Image (tube, rainbow, N blue to C red):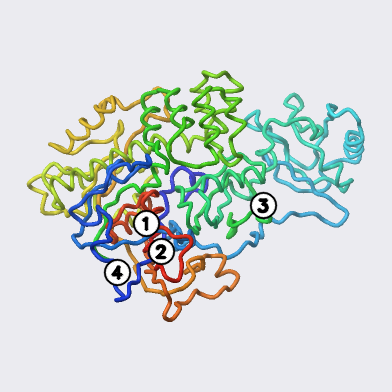
Amino acid sequence: MDSDAVAETSPPPAKKVKIESEVTKTSENKTVSEDTKPKGSSAETTATSSDTNGHVAESDVGITQYVSSHQGFTAIIKQRYSDFIVNEVSDEGTEVHLTSTDLPQEVEEQVGSGTFYQKMNVHRWPTHDPDVLSEEDRAKLQTLLDDADKKASILLEMMKVSAVAPDDEGVEGVEAVLAPVDEAAIAGSGGGWDKENAQPSLIPKQQKQTNEHAREWKPSRGNYCRFVLYKENKDTMDAINLISRLARLKTQLFSYAGTKDKRAKTSQEITAFRVTANKLQAVNTKLRNMMMGNFRLVFTRPDFINYYGMQRFGTTSIPTHHVGRALLHSQWMEAVDLILKPRKSGDDSMKKCREEWGKSRDPSAALRYVPSHHNIERTLLETLMKQGETSYANALQALPRNTRLMYAHAYQSYVWNSMTSRRLAEFGYKVKVGDLVIPHSINWEGRGGDDESKLQPTVVTEENQSEYSIQDLVLPLPGHDVIYPDGEVGSWYRELMEKDDLDIDNMKQKNKDYSLPGDYRHLLVTPRDVTWDVVTYNDFTVPLSQGDLDVMFNKPQPESVKEGKFRALRLEFSLPSSTYATMALREILKIDTSSTFQTSLNVTTPTDSEPVKSTVR
């Protein structure tokens, strides 16, 4: 694959998941009884709506159906964050693991003893001849470096080189190997181009350059550094924000194939544009429960419903798809207010900030109460404070593009979940005339091409109906470049979006970020490489699986405790990209996966007389 297109054209990698689902151990060594099962745990019962605390339940985001008819059982998902171990599956089909923090050989700096070789960004200079500078020009250069006037410049006549002027004016310098001079002094020089004399000029580096990041990059490195990010109990966006801040880099330089669960041990590949492995490795010493490395220029049936998981919609009483709906309406003030306004649930550290915003709508006053790690709210308030209290559109534009798109995509996910539940409830698990199909093998094989939206579905007819199964069935995420199923299912899309005052036939927006083309998603997914075992234990704070760091530092695999008080189901399986492991667990357990319900099952202070409730995380 062309390395220049990695960030834009690579499909999201699949992932390998290890999970411990903690199953209640009763005196009869059985799972919990029918009487203790929560409502909504059977195949015939759907999830309840928002609870009295204002949290979002599964039914609020369109998740209501199951594939199988077994009764399910009660378990807590992720009692410890270490119960949930997620490893991406790379484009090559291998699991992504952090195994080393060593630097690749090609990025080592070349600094000789007593000699410094300053390599300025190469632009059509084919030689590294140390005699490129004459004695006279070397003297000029030393005079320049000794000059107190930092805006002074000189012209150097280059020898033994066929000088070719750059095609563009953006050249930041020439590549040359300079004769030995003082290391600190020469490190302070930069470069420019004298168009009139068709030769380079040198200016002090202290003078601000237009693009320092590009000027210092060596083309021999390639444009991307790919590495494995291992993290524990931290959201991917927060991790990237922290790395960016510590390395003094822009977050836009990093790209990845999707956010991984916060409450988990996860390993995923990150691509950084023109960032050296040295710079990233140096940050490792400042990280906690995170590390970067690997730098480089069986549950076979039944399927599960390929819902977008609850993490797609946030964990507070104001779900992210409500913000997305406001953005699609170009209601900038409403979108900002939904992000900042008080709510019944959420992070307590933001409570004072939200209360202040709800009371005064004064960004400077609310900003005083924003914790440093709440980057979204901080960015909105800082922009409003600097550009005016009504500059809502500018405040939203100040957010990283991925963050803005997250909200818009959440609305698409909500519509898709709702349509999938209704399609399965009304017509079951058989392909019908008017459905849209794409061979399900594409989930594992990759779509190919540079534009995933180019993959078009086939409309099922009476003539081809027998050629397809429910595994091939897809539904569209709403957008301006998709087709909808014929008949009732297509009319449901129109009906739902009309309730939200959105025109399904006019999804293009003036703001291109919110002009969503749409896509297609399979209704069912089949996991691969499924293994499982049951372990017993006494201490619920002790990890039950190994993360990458545990393997790197030769920590032993956690073992089952004979006659342990508690029991956990440990699962390992592979999923294609853009699927949610929690939705696979939901199919087994038949319980609500929302954070509210899972928190109600969780136990932090068990006693010897009280068995720990079942937990799946």
Depth check: 328 or 176 in front? 328
Note whether 35 is above or below 312 in the view shown.
below
Type of amino acid at the residue the image marks with label 4: Thr
Q: In this rendering, which labeled residue sits more in front, label 4 or label 3?
A: 4
Type of amino acid at the residue the image marks with label 2: Ile
Q: Quadrant of the C terminus?
A: bottom left
The numbered dot on residue 19 is 2
Give the Cα separation between the discs numbered 4 and 2.
18 Å
How packed is label 3: few (under 14 Cα within 10 Å), some, or many (20 or more)?
some
Note whether 19 is above or below 180 in the view shown.
below
Query: Which label's residue is closer to the chain start, 1 or 2?
Result: 2
The outermost residue toward the left is 462
Q: Are marks 1 and 2 in contact (CB under 8 Å)?
A: yes
Residue 194 vs residue 350: left or right? Answer: right
Query: Which label's residue is closer to the chain start, 3 or 2?
Result: 2
Residue 458 location (% of width, % of height): 19, 44
The numbered dot on residue 31 is 4
The outermost residue toward the front is 609
Depth check: 44 or 122 in front? 44
Residue 467 vs residue 248: left or right? Answer: left
The numbered dot on residue 581 is 1
Give the Cα separation between the discs numbered 4 and 3.
46 Å
Residue 112 location (% of width, % of height): 82, 56
Image quarter of residue 383:
top right
How packed is label 2: few (under 14 Cα within 10 Å), some, or many (20 or more)?
many
The numbered dot on residue 283 is 3
How packed is label 1: few (under 14 Cα within 10 Å), some, or many (20 or more)?
many
Query: Which label's residue is closer to the chain start, 1 or 4?
Result: 4
The numbered dot on residue 363 is none
Asked which secondary structure carries label 1, the reply is helix
Q: Are marks 4 and 2 in contact (CB under 8 Å)?
A: no
